[in-house]
Amino acid sequence: MENKRPGINTICTHVGEIKDEQFKGAISPLYMSTSYAYEDVEVLRYPRYFNTPNQEALGKKVAMLEKCEAGMIFGSGMAAVSTTLLAFLHKGDHVVVQKTIYGGAYNFIVEEFPKYGIEFDFTEGFSEEDFKSKIKENTKVIYVETPSNPLMLITDLEMITNLAKPKGIVTMIDNTFASPINQTPIDFGIDIMIHSATKYMGGHSDICAGAVAASEEHILKIWNVGKNLGGSLSDYTVWLLERSMKTMAIRVRAQNQNAKKMARWLQNHDLVKKVYYPGLKDHPSYALAKKQMKGFTGMLSFEVHDEVDLNQFMKSLKLIKQSMSLAGVESTILVPAKASHFLLGEEERAKQGISENLMRFSVGIESTKDLKEDITQAFNSL
Ligand SMILES: *Cc1c(COP(=O)(O)O)cnc(C)c1O
């Protein structure tokens, strides 16, 4: 990247695009071939080698968005998470994992690592001491996710790098909630960025995909394991994801703005007890979020007072949909205690500060006037 870095919307729209030399079309052609010549070629191409023309092209866009040398596209966020972790952890190795991470990643570690003889420890919290105290002689990886789900707590990325670098520990972040628009962790020395592209990269709740960005050297390691595990994405979906990513910066910034407006509005609502949004000055991680993020995301959580019948409230919403997933252009809402964090149990939820009255709100791009109206009529129906 000796050239000046293009603006974010130019990267989203153009970087990695395939020139249509034959027909001079405006967009990347879609190459669905699963079979390519093997003689007189520079590379052996095959979908599971993550190197079809469309896979390679989109990998370049992800890499530049994350300011990294290389990128890879996966069949799901979990394919990206599992392949990346297994590329750096071998039998007898140890990994320090942040306390609150995506449920699927937690399950993968807890259920699969014992079979591979990989040791792991979860931190007690988010502080330097919490991470430092878990590092052992055989620690090879520190794995974090920030902002965390659903309370939007922030992990200090510079602190993580300072702990890891002197010991030669590889650092990985699940950067899904922030998206590369709001956070580029390499700025703080993090080695490997992982995404569920099902969320902000796809952005329309119609694509399941994953992505990783890192140095050439690290990506080669991930590729070596990836081709064996087979978590590649079909070229048709890669092509659709490229289309989605052209508008990612515009979408995410609109969602940032909407979420901030909704957070402030909810904060002043009589029936709302507490709002968790890192862009609010009273959020415990506000200073840290301001330091390491460019925007505060479209995700927020809010707790309602005990007298509110959550079931009734959720059922009364007309515009905002109840949904397990997040980050689409449409606003969605979920009760963590009943969905994403149900399996944790009430005791563990209480320990993590996740109240039974908490709602996670993925703010879309609709007019905030309509979102406010929807919430108001749902509260009024109680
Ligand atoms: C959804 C999600 C994942 C898993 O991604 P899939 O595409 O569902 O496999 C990982 N991390 C975070 C933070 C997520 O929200």
Image: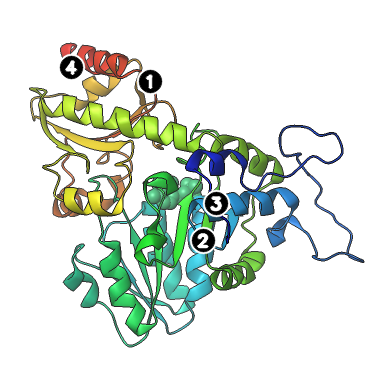
Marks 1,4: beta carbons within 8 A: no
Q: Is residue 45 left or right of residue 170?
A: right
The disc labelled 1 sits on which kind of residue?
A: Glu
Q: Is residue 193 above or below residue 336?
A: below
Q: Choose mark 4 or mark 3, whichever is in front.
A: 3
Marks 2,1: beta carbons within 8 A: no
Q: Nearer the viewer, residue 297 or 198?
A: 297
- The image's mark for residue 162 is none
Q: Is mark 4 within 8 Å of ligand 1?
A: no
Q: Nearer the viewer, residue 324 or 30?
A: 30
Q: Choose mark 2 or mark 1, whichever is in front.
A: 2
Q: How packed is label 3: few (under 14 Cα within 10 Å), some, or many (20 or more)? A: many
The disc labelled 3 sits on which kind of residue?
A: Val
| Residue farthest to the bottom, as pictured | 137
Between disc 1 and disc 3, whose residue precedes? 3
Between disc 1 and disc 4, whose residue precedes? 1
The disc labelled 4 sits on which kind of residue?
A: Phe
Question: What residue do we see at 27% from left, 40% from top?
Answer: 336
What colouring style does the render use?
rainbow
Q: Is residue 353 above or below residue 186?
A: above
Mark 3 lies on residue:
62
| Residue farthest to the right, as pictured | 39
Mark 2 lies on residue:
68
Label 4 and label 2: CA atoms lie apart by 46 Å
